[in-house]
Image (cartoon, rainbow, N blue to C red):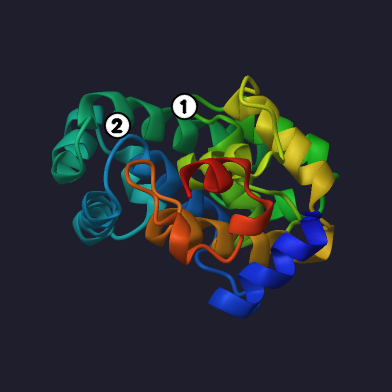
Amino acid sequence: MTIDEIIQLLGQEYGLPQWRQRRDPLSELIGAILSQNTSDVNSHRAFDSLISTFGTWDRVSEASIGEVAEAIACGGLSRIKAPRIKAILEGIPNDHSSLNLGFLGELPIPEARAWLQALPGVGPKTASCVLLFSLGRPVLPVDTHVYRVSRRLGLIDSGVSPARAHQLLEELVPAEAIYQFHLNMLAHGRGVCRAQRPRCHECVLREGCIHGKGAI
């Protein structure tokens, strides 16, 4: 099964989402840090608590690590994430004189990705989320669902690391389809191609899936 066929079948099943900005780039970055190793529910609670406590990113940058940790405690791992958030916010003005990451939209994608990944706690997935969801750049985040489904479909080998998968899948998926591909693979991984007890009989991709054919 080709990548175009996969994109088409997933589109028929889950729709054709059009890009819209989820948050501004800095908010997307902080939200992505808070989402690491926690549930969506808890990470959203931590983000909302951070905003309601301080109001602006400038005020967060002026707060102590302990104050930030207290505000995001509901999201888990606050002692790890608070120093990362502080370091990120304190580092931005040193480079660009304001707490605004809009300049990433003007940089070549490799430079924008490298700038983000130089920040503490920012890996390929977090950087990709910022570039795709806040700036509409054709960069593919590979989370656990996209990674799992891609391996089962044979789009990437089983031994490929998640970091390497970002590059391989990004090269494979047409730029104009990256947003749709990510969201639909995510939906498919959550609802059908689950880690435990995948629902292969309901899968629209089963005819081209190595794992699915074996399971059926």
Q: Amino acid at mark 1?
A: Gly
Residue 16 rendering spot, x and y as whole percentages: 64, 79
Residue 138 rendering spot, x and y as whole percentages: 76, 56
Q: Are marks 2 and 1 in contact (CB under 8 Å)?
A: no
Q: Nearer the viewer, mark 2 or mark 1?
A: 1
Quarter of the image for residue 75 reads top left
Residue at the spot 44% in from the left edge and 45% down from the top edge? 32
Residue at the spot 46% in from the left edge and 38% down from the top edge? 89
Residue nearest the observer in this picture, 197 or 190: 197
Residue at the spot 63% in from the left edge and 48% down from the top edge? 209
Residue at the spot 72% in from the left edge and 59% down from the top edge? 178
Q: Is residue 198 above or below residue 17?
A: above
Label 2: element kind: helix
Residue 141 horizontal side relative to residue 103, left or right: left
Give residue 82's mark.
Answer: 2
Quarter of the image for residue 184 reads bottom right
Q: Earlier in the sequence, mark 2 or mark 1?
A: 2
Give residue 53's mark.
Answer: none
Going by the picture, which residue comes out furthest to the top? Answer: 159
Residue 128 rendering spot, x and y as whole percentages: 63, 45
Give residue 121's mark.
Answer: 1
Q: Is residue 118 above or below residue 23?
A: above
